[in-house]
Amino acid sequence: MCPGRRRLERFWDGQRLKFVWNKLEVLSLDGRSRPVALTMNGRQYRRGLDGNCKEIVRVAGPTERDLYDAVPMAASQMDDLLREWSQRISSWMPFEVEDWLVGLRRDARNFCSIYQPVSILPPDQYRSLVFQLTEGCAYNRCSFCQLYQDRPYRCKDRQSFSRHIGRVLEYFGPALPWRRGVFLGDANAAGISTARLSEALEQIRQSLPCDGTDQQGAPRHPLQFEQVSSFQDTFSGRLRAVQDWRQLRKLGLDQVHLGIESGSSAVLDLLRKPIESGRVVEMINRLQQADIRVSLIFLLGAGGRELAHSHVHGTLELLQRVQLRAQDRVYLSDLLVHPGSDYHVLSQELGITPLTRWECREQARTLRESLRYEPPPRGPAVALYDVRQFVYV
């Protein structure tokens, strides 16, 4: 505790430094003194490594269940909050606050020179060390998605990816211990050729030294960097053979996230997702045979009120055709309808009424109760996935 400042406490857990003011307000810094989260005056804020900031605010509604929104903030607003915090922790800061803020802006520019925007990660991967093997989305025609409209698709070759890995590790440096596992971005990195994906996994293994092997002889890393996950679509290219998945599993691929969105063909047509349920089921079966975890992502509210029954019924029917294990996951994410998007235009033309956020929660409740999975850890987790709040910190 700082002398003369009895309300200030400091904690270091080997990963992040936390200052607690009056037991209520908290400032969290990573291993390179980057602010990542803070609470002040009952409000929550997050600062991304790219310098973008959000305030997390509670949304009032007709039930007691909490909903939250993320409101983008100007960098100057975050600077003001950090200036106020710096007065509280001045005796612990070996630098002037304005120098610190200038350094943070420089750091954010450095991050943006290494990465394309890290648009989204699955919730269980928020702490992952992201390597962008691919940039953008090879398909990029979903009617609802705006995540990758700002960049062309490309897959890095061996030399480019090697440079990227080196720059990422140098950037995180002392902040690396907070990370857990590796996520290969962007939208469909697990869908590239088996040869290139295997090569990339080998590059990661060579760049991240391990501390021995597990009982199966696979490399083990104290930060679980031998556990790699990635998104993959369910409709492009040929289905990968089980033996190829097993090869990738031996090289560290531990989990694949599938954006299925719905089990209803009518809803999928509206979303412009050319998914066939039989192919999805076969893909999941092959991943499971290779001992790769799967997480299946579905969109709450897709198809609005008019297609709600078809959406729920088709999704349940699809999920009942696969045998999810305790290590697998189902994510339920609200459909975000962007004004002017193809989905917005199509749904207006078809007279589709969007669901409110509270109706989406009811849809989630219906799906959960109908699935009747055993609760974790005996059964797969079924969790909400709120993309509004995502910030890569």
Image (tube, rainbow, N blue to C red):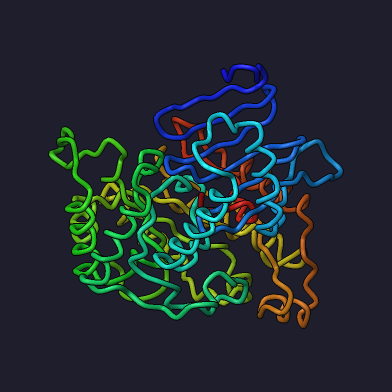
Residue 89 shown left or right of residue 156 in the figure: right
Instruction: Identify the residue at image location x=16%, y=42%.
Output: 218
Q: Nearer the viewer, residue 106 or 317?
A: 106
Residue 27 shown left or right of residue 285 in the figure: right
Q: Nearer the viewer, residue 322 or 75?
A: 75
Q: Is residue 225 above or below residue 108?
A: above
Q: Nearer the viewer, residue 259 or 179?
A: 179
Q: Quadrant of residue 2?
A: top right
Examine the rendering and report whether any part of residue 279 can be seen: no
Q: Is residue 255 above or below residue 146?
A: above
Estimate the x, y position of residue 10 in percent, counting from the top left: 54, 24
Q: Is residue 156 above or below residue 18?
A: below
If the image is split into quadrants, where does the N terminus sit? top right
Estimate the x, y position of residue 265 in percent, counting from the top left: 58, 71
Residue 124 shown left or right of residue 87 in the figure: left
Please, which residue is most extreme toward the right here? 62
